[in-house]
Image (cartoon, rainbow, N blue to C red):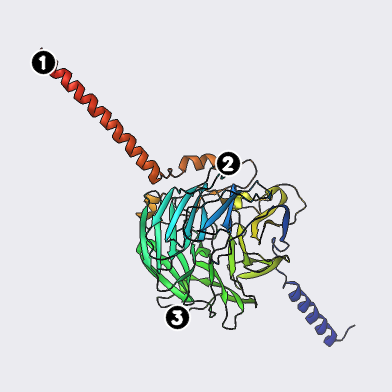
Amino acid sequence: ALPISQIVSLIFQVARASLQMKVVRDSKYRHVHGDALKQNYQDLRLSTKASESAGIRGNSKFFAFPWESGGGGTLAVIQTSRYGRMPRDLPLVTGHTGGILDFEFNPFDDNMLVTASEDLTLKVWQIPDEGLKQHMKDPLLTLEGHGKKVSFSTFNPTAANIVASAGFDMLCKVWDLSEQAEAFSIPVPEQVMHLKWNYTGSLLAATCKDKKLRIIDPRQNKVASEAKIHDGAKASKVEWLGSNSATEECHKLVTTGFSAQAERQLAIWDTRKFTSDGQGVDSLNLLTLDQGTGALFPFFDPGCQMLYVAGKGDGNVRFFEVTPEEPCLHYISDYRSLTPQKGFGFFPKRCVDVSTHEIMRGLKLESTAVQVLSFKVPRKSEAFQEDIFPDCDAGVPAISAEEWTSSQEARMPILRSMKPGEENSAASAAKASAAGPIVSVKDLKKQLADALEKMKALETENEALKAELAKAKEA
């Protein structure tokens, strides 16, 4: 028989081993990996103008990024199906007289794009289905109201035709595109370094130059609360969390920034703990990542509850799993390459290839090319994997612009199944609840001119009938 001391020692060893085994979290996303697809886009002339935007945006039809130009700001909008080398005389969006600092596609209309520029305007563009065949100079709309450069523009994720913008004039504005007018204007104490809508499209988060994050309630025309986030002087970025099934998480957000020693950081916050002066607010978790110099951009996938972090100038993309319980952020792995990225973005979730178990598809903007990155969960089965593909955003507005501007209502995004063959029901729902088309000023003038001409013809006809009636009476 073994002595008691040895038995106790063995029990401790087994207990220690079981604890060590539990260090590796049980997660279906533990083996997610990223790969660059063979098909890419080459011979691109990327603009060298520095901006605080992510640098590239994409959807099921197009992707866009700032193009190098001698004069004002130009934007390349290229069909996603157009792989390979691009011609030197690529047709561009050329309507701005100053550099384009931010841009974004409409989540409910793949053909619509908003741009924010140094020329103090925002412009809305309607891209033809077949792509640009010549330079596009005339926008659908021009929105004027900022007194200085416009640095950010972003569509509301649930309300139709609602756009938020921020400028160097320390104003955050919300625009109603269906009315072609400013709906709300909120003064912000400092220059905005990043601007993001929350999951339900009711609040805006703005990271500012004074190292604070401010929560803006646009329909109350006020800054609701704030918190001091990262101590470093460089730009901080923000991303909201939450989903239809995790409504409590909608109060949380993630920020990236720099420490006082210039280390790059990632932090998670609960906005319910924010205060009116921003003092005494602690993060739920703060991770120090590295000594990199470029701003880190966070991207959240509500379906899989995964966070992707890509830095300008980095060759890698880190990914984390987000959980409600502490420590909230769990590092999984990273995609690595030797070529640094000038910008990074993701396609909407409905663009992924579920047959290859692809959970996210990214766009990596390089000096002369765009690489498509595919993030996959390795599975042997070829069947549709419901556990890693919960319902995704259907690309349908949950509330109209009129309802949103005239109430305090916040609605969850409308979702659809990701199962192949079930997209058609979402498409018909989209058509049924689609926002009405936006009519440009040019078209409105034409309609007015046509109406006036018609009125003139009717008046002439009326006068002729009156004259005939008078003659008949005399006879």
Mark 1 Cα shell of 10 Å, populated few (<14), some (14-19), many (≥20): few
- Judge whether 215 appears above or below 429 on screen: below
Per the image, label 1 sits on a secondary structure element best described as helix
Instruction: Give the left or right position of residue 18, taking residue 314 as reference.
Output: right
Residue at point 43%, 51% (across, down): 161
Q: Earlier in the sequence, mark 1 or mark 2?
A: 2
In the image, is residue 309 above or below residue 92? below
Comes first in the chain, label 3 or label 1: 3
Kindly identify which residue carries mark 3. Answer: 279
Q: Please give the residue where the numbered disc 1 appears in the rendered image.
A: 473
Residue at label 2?
A: 130
Percent coordinates x, y for residue 324 in the rendering: 58, 67
Tag 2–tag 3 contact (CB < 8 Å)? no
Rounded to the nearest angstrom, the CA distance separating label 1 from label 2 is: 62 Å
Observer-nearest of 183 and 54: 54
Q: Amino acid at mark 2?
A: Glu
